Image: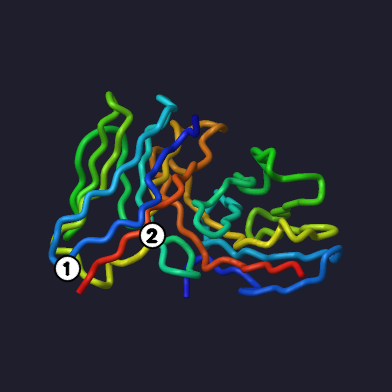
Amino acid sequence: DTGVSQDPRHKITKRGQNVTFRCDPISEHNRLYWYRQTLGQGPEFLTYFQNEAQLEKSRLLSDRFSAERPKGSFSTLEIQRTEQGDSAMYLCASSLRQGINTEAFFGQGTRLTVV
Amino acid sequence: QKEVEQDPGPLSVPEGAIVSLNCTYSNSAFQYFMWYRQYSRKGPELLMYTYSSGNKEDGRFTAQVDKSSKYISLFIRDSQPSDSATYLCAMSAVPNRDDKIIFGKGTRLHILP
């Protein structure tokens, strides 16, 4: 399978716990995006990377959230001290940013439930 | 005003009908326009991708971009029950550092057999 892979697919955690999600992009894609999606809403931008550099963080990304892409390949998204409002689908996408090409492909997402 | 506006629906049409889905946007820097299809509890799947204005056709799907009106459309011909899903429009600006992809809320589409 050469698509975007996310792990885990589902995560249930107690409020106050830390969680970490992993995203493996399509091989050689230099862009990697994180989005959050709640029921009935479109994906909301959280952050994105060009190779290992984090280009922008949304104001949605509070200090409890941190994302890394240490070697420009896979990425992790960590949420510290989870709150019930963090319950959502966390989506990762990757693209090959080259010239005008910007098509982004998504993984299946990690569904987080904070109880 | 949100950067990308999309009617959330739901939109119900009979099988075989032509479906028209639309988005408006406010950022004139947007140059890349995409349509994604998302089934329940799945990740979005890229359907169509258009650069700048004009039309693009792929099988039963046609994407149109009117930059002068800041309006994009997706048409589905001969709609099938399997087309029932949420359709998301998405767009981004010219290649520079501020070119993140912004999504609409999505339109829920039901094709009635």
Q: Which chain carries label 1?
A: B
Is residue B53 shown left or right of residue A40? Answer: left
Residue found 85% across the figure and 59% down from its top: A81
Residue found 63% across the figure and 58% down from its top: A73
Name the quadrant of the C terminus of chain A: bottom right
Q: What residue type is labelled 1?
A: Glu
Number of the label disc, if any, that sits on residue B15: 1
Q: Mark 2 lies on which chain?
A: B
Mark 1 or mark 2: name the one nearer the start of the chain: 1
Give the CA distance from mark 1 to mark 2: 16 Å
Is residue A40 shown left or right of residue A49? Answer: left
**Relative vertical location of residue A12 with respect to residue A45 in this rendering, above or below:** below
Q: Residues within 10 Å of mark 1 (few under 14, many from 20)?
A: some
Q: Which amino acid does label 2 sit on?
A: Thr
Q: Are marks 1 and 2 in contact (CB under 8 Å)?
A: no
**Relative vertical location of residue A110 with respect to residue B73 in this rendering, above or below:** below
Q: What element carries label 2?
A: strand
Residue A61 screen position, x and y as percent: 71, 45
As rendered, which of B20 and B101 lies closer to the eye?
Answer: B20
Is residue B104 shown left or right of residue A39? Answer: left
Which residue in the structure is indicated by mark 2?
B86
